[in-house]
Image (cartoon, rainbow, N blue to C red):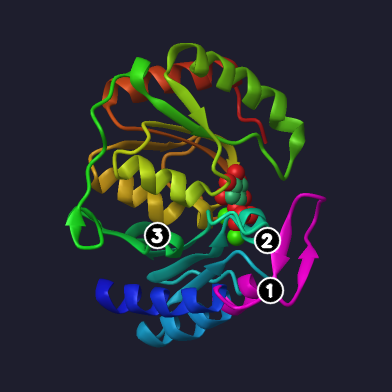
Amino acid sequence: MITQITEIVREASLLMKKDIEDISQKGNASNYVTSADIAVQDFLYEKLRALLPGSGFIGEEGDAAFQTAEYTWVIDPIDGTSNFIRDLGLSVISVALLKDNAPYIGVVYFPYRDEMYYAKAGKGAFMNGKPIHVSDRDYAHSHLCSAMSLYDKRHASACFRIIEKVYDECDDLRRLGTAALELSYLAAGRVELYFEIRIFPWDAAAAALLIQEAGGYVEFLFHDSLPLDGPFGVIAANTKENFKKLRATVYGELKEKPF
Ligand code: IPD
Ligand code: CA
Ligand code: CA
């Protein structure tokens, strides 16, 4: 099954290599969708549902059905759309397969470096066929990836406060503009800490499984399991110790559910 999914995702990535024919704004000023986002999602919708007849589908774009079933696909056709529009080379395709609403398979493909990340619950995490593991760097030597609630800036000041506190104690900060890639990098040992206040299931479902299978820790803020009707916050870290420290800082600042 994973091989078939990765083949479909790799084929879908060819649709990202064509010229962007159309860019339109969604909801607010910073949120865009391109013809490529739609083309990739439509392709995945057809191919993945054919792979698993009767499966449900939750996709970021358009009017894709929000339909859950015993097996449900959760898709971000292009995570990092702003990067994609600007040709920054930092965008991925993220595909999760849930079984009974819990992440069962996660695939994140980064076409610019031809890196295929994948994991199956209980079976470990891999990149291009090789097992991946979180790093063992301590907090002081950690890199934090984060974001400032781009699509609802009412929460930005809380993010900046939290980021400033973590930044004081860690090594450095990165904002790559693609949550799925940043979380995959955490699974692969390239960064150590992640915090985002407002994220959707398609951003995090696949990479959260990668992190758990790579030995790391993930929590969806104020939730016991992956919420499917987002948005929600997420924290992740390489080690239990770093996770506890990051968690204390985030909850110390937020105190209650922000939305
Ligand atoms: C966004 C990116 C960004 C994150 C946002 C996401 P999109 O996804 O992952 O890094 O900060 O929360 O919505 O809109 O590029 O698919
Ligand atoms: Ca996304
Ligand atoms: Ca997207």
Judging depth in this view, the residue of 32 and 124 nearest the camera is 32
Residue in the image at 29% along x and 19% along y: 138
Placement of the C terminus among the 4 image quadrants:
top right
Marks 3 and 1, Cα distance to the nearest angstrom?
Answer: 20 Å
Check disc 3 and report the residue beneath it.
Answer: 113
The disc, 2 or 1, on the residue closer to the chain's N-terminal end is 1
Would residue 105 be seen by someone viewing this image from the given angle?
no
Check disc 2 and report the residue beneath it.
Answer: 85
Mark 3 lies on a secondary structure that is helix
Q: Position of residue 70 (x, y in %)?
A: 38, 70
Mark 2 lies on a secondary structure that is helix
Label pair 2/1, CB-CB below 8 angstroms: yes
Check disc 1 and report the residue beneath it.
Answer: 20
Relative horizontal placement of residue 123, taking residue 117 as reference (left or right): left
Q: Considering only vertical position in the picture, is 249 above or below 114? A: above
Relative horizontal placement of residue 30, taking residue 223 as reference (left or right): right
Magenta-tinted stretch = 17-40
The disc, 3 or 1, on the residue closer to the chain's N-terminal end is 1
Q: Position of residue 105 (x, y in %)?
A: 31, 62
Residue in the image at 70% along x and 41% along y: 150
Q: Considering only vertical position in the picture, is 61 above or below 87? A: below
